[in-house]
Image (cartoon, rainbow, N blue to C red):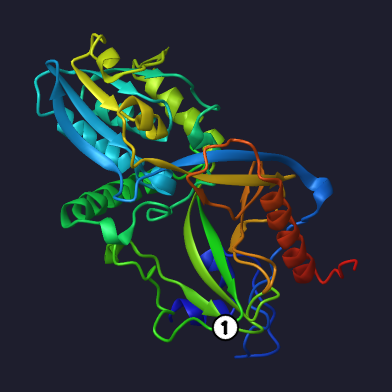
Amino acid sequence: MDRRTLLKTGGMGILGLGVAGCFRGSGSMVSPALRLAPVQASWDRVIRTTVGLRPYRPSGFVLRAGRMDGKTLIHNYGHGGSGMSLSWGTGSMAADMALRGEARDAAVIGCGVAGLTTARQLQRRGFAVTIYAMTVPPDTTSNMSLAGWTPTSGLVDRSRRTPAWDAQFREAARIAYKQLQLLVGPDYGISWLDGYALRETAPPQGTEGGGEGDSLLPDDLRTGQVVLGPGEHSFPTRYATLRTSIRIEPSIYLEALVRDFRRYGGEIVIRKFDTPRDLMTLEESVVVNCTGLGSHDLFSDEELTPLKGQLTLLVPQPEVNYSTFGGLPGTGGFIHMQPRSDGIALGGTSEEGEWSLEPDEEARLRVVDSHIRLFSAMAGIPLES
């Protein structure tokens, strides 16, 4: 029995996707197959809006090692919107680069997700590690992330890719995907979550079996999808494409990484570096640069540019345990929703080259109002004119 058949014949308990559908009789189809709790989307349930700047490089992240003033200098930055997804992988590869030398003491610059996972991978290889950073969780860019398994999000311009970079990406993705699965559970705030892409038209023929349709992601890391048609789902669109993926709750996850780093002897020092030469004053023999957007000024990386994104969070709803991508037709651009223990996160913005950390009120109005319309229609609640 394939997954689509299982969905349509009421096997929801087995899949952990929600309440089983109702049968009309032996062998009948489920209509609808899914009964999901609508988000209570309203302006009086908004609790905060956060802004984060993703470190984007059109040619992709930088992962390379070199020498400077007798020290090994390793760069690991520029992951765009894929830092939460890929950091265990690029951190592992950076740590392997550090192993090529004899020294077993390392300084990691930056305390976001790239810095913390790199530090842990170095510790696993026997290094004594100190993190130097201007800010620590919960005040890092990583804390502002929606966070989940989105390894190609805001990562690279297809026209700028090279075979060597593609190989780096695929190795990093495989390492990271395995590691994130091993950390699933409440201690790290990582879980599997069903996501529904909402649409009015059926996906193109041949895409129902799965795959992101992106040649960058290896076939073995593509998750399958199921296309649900009219009467097979709870949403106010004709079709909903279901895919199960990893969700990460940043506040829980980053604090857990800090805890683990300190548990294994790591130290965090608050310090600012203005030039690469400042890094050479450190005692450690290996320096790993995980400064994200900070590399724009620190290492004069002019290609590095921010992708500004913002999230508006609603009061948490424990009964909402699914995410959505897209909304009703004609509501003004792409939107997405993801539930977390600290709130229902509503998003749908990405501004390249925008350095401001101030919320965009026009974008906030669009995202929240679009979700109000979507979930009011899902609940059958008429909107006031």
At horizontal 32% and vertical 49% (from top left) the residue drawn is 178
Note whether residue 164 is visible.
Answer: yes
Q: Residues within 10 Å of mark 1 (few under 14, many from 20)?
A: few
Q: Is residue 299 above or below residue 367?
A: above
The quadrant of the image that shows the N terminus is: bottom left
| Front one among 52 and 269 | 52
* Spot occupied by residue 182 in the image (x, y as percentages of width and height): 37, 45
Note whether residue 186 is visible.
Answer: no
The quadrant of the image that shows the C terminus is: bottom right
Q: Is residue 341 above or below residue 68?
A: below
* Spot occupied by residue 263 in the image (x, y as percentages of width and height): 39, 19
Q: How many marks?
A: 1
Q: Is residue 124 above or below residue 230?
A: above
At horizontal 19% and vertical 54% (from top left) the residue drawn is 167
* Spot occupied by residue 362 in the image (x, y as percentages of width and height): 70, 51
For disc 1, the marked residue is 201
- Identity of the residue furthest to the right in this view: 384
Q: Amino acid at mark 1?
A: Thr
| Front one among 261 and 298 | 298
276 displayed left or right of 133 = left
* Spot occupied by residue 160 in the image (x, y as percentages of width and height): 27, 56
| Front one among 315 and 152 | 152
Q: Is residue 189 above or below residue 219?
A: above
Secondary structure under the numbered disc 1 in the rendered image: loop
| Front one among 95 and 233 | 95
145 displayed left or right of 276 = right
